[in-house]
Image (tube, rainbow, N blue to C red):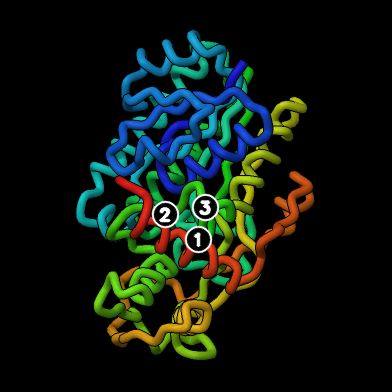
């Protein structure tokens, strides 16, 4: 029996593959390599280059590898792009997830873990935001993920099928062992951008909005280390294997840092100063987005191990340095 990881050559997916392999699991990865990298996939896992839109391919993979659970990361994740190209997001995130679900049901796969997002909350009325808060996504990205959550719930109601949907907050950092990390050259993640700027790969960076109702005027986000995130997925897999009911859970620490605080941390850890331009707000950015994390800690018995901004930044910077010297895309 094995675990299928879709998008397992990407940032979070590659960390999940290492986590599963480290735990003794047999793993098969399906990734079209549009944004992922072959070298990011653990050697012990089998990589099938293909698209989850191809339901026949997924059915063949499930049958050939004896897949008993799916961890689903494949999809598009850039919010501004989703606004300019919404149909891409409804195809990649929603329609393709429907095909994956259809293959799972047809082949008798009873367990799925889904990579959802805090973007389903839109502009939350209060922080920390809990799982029962009103869902009001303000981008096609958030809506596409919300629609997939609805498909999961309907599928679980109709079939012998259970799932855990994890709503990510801001994922950052890299594998402490240096095996994988955020490797998209022009990624938009704040810690990635600040790390690249500190290392001279960017001439400078911008802060979008300094007039928010926060202590220093910049947006506050809940940054979770990618290794803690994938451990939450492992805990979710154990949970589903115990034949328990489906869950939708926030995946964050329950505390946040402002943009200025993150930039200061990167400067402090790197020992480098760099140019930061102060710009106007971007449309659709909430002032604060912090997870209420009580439920994931209680239900999955999950406890973070790397809940420290300087640690997250240290690992991100180490990965950026490795990318510059040893990792070939």
Q: Mark 3 or mark 1, which is nearer to you?
A: 3
Q: Give the Cα distance between marks 3 and 1.
A: 14 Å
Is 39 or 16 nearer to us in this picture?
39
Q: Residues within 10 Å of mark 3 (few under 14, many from 20)?
A: few
Q: Earlier in the sequence, mark 3 or mark 1?
A: 1
State the residue in front, 165 or 257.
Answer: 257
Whether residue 192 is visible, yes or no, is yes
Q: Where in the figure is residue 201, as x and y percent of width and height?
A: 28, 70
Q: Residue at x 35, y 69 (%)?
A: 196
Q: Which mark is residue 178?
A: 3
Residue 135 visible, this orientation: no
What secondary structure is found at the residue carrying circle 3?
Answer: loop
Q: Position of residue 280 (x, y in %)?
A: 28, 83
The residue carrying pointer 1 sits among few (fewer than 14), some (14 to 19) or many (20 or more) residues within 10 Å by Cα, namely: many
Q: Which residue is mark 2?
A: 182
Q: Residue at position x 30%, y 79% from top?
A: 206
């Amino acid at each position: 029996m094995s675990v299928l990881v879709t998008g397992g050559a990407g940032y979070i997916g590659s960390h999940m593959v290492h986590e599963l392999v480290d735990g003794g699991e047999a793993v098969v990865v399906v990734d079209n390599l549009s944004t992922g990298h072959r070298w990011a996939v653990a050697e012990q896992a089998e990589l099938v280059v293909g698209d989850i839109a191809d339901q026949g391919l997924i059915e063949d993979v499930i049958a050939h590898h004896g897949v008993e659970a799916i961890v689903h990361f494949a999809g598009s994740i850039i919010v501004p792009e989703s606004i300019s190209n919404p149909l891409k997001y409804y195809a990649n995130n929603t329609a393709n997830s429907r095909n994956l679900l259809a293959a799972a049901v047809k082949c008798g796969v009873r367990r799925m873990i889904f990579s959802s997002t805090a973007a389903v909350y839109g502009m939350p009325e209060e922080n920390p935001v809990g799982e029962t808060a009103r869902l009001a996504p303000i981008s096609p990205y958030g809506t596409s993920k919300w629609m997939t959550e609805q498909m999961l719930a309907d599928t679980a109601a109709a079939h012998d099928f259970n799932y855990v949907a994890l709503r990510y907050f801001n994922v950052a950092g890299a594998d402490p062992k240096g095996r994988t990390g955020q490797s998209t050259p022009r990624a938009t993640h704040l810690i990635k951008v600040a790390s690249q700027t500190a290392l001279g790969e960017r001439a400078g960076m911008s802060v979008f909005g300094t007039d928010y109702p926060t202590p220093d005027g910049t947006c506050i986000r809940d940054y979770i280390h990618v290794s803690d995130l994938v451990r939450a997925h492992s805990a979710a897999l154990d949970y589903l294997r115990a034949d328990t009911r489906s869950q939708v859970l926030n995946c964050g620490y329950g505390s946040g840092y402002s943009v200025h605080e993150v930039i200061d941390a990167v400067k402090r850890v790197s020992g480098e100063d760099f140019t930061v331009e102060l710009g106007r707000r971007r449309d659709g950015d909430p002032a604060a987005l912090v997870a209420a994390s009580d439920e994931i800690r209680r239900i999955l018995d999950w406890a973070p191990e790397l809940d420290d901004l300087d640690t997250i930044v240290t690992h991100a910077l180490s990965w950026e340095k490795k990318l510059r010297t040893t990792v070939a895309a």
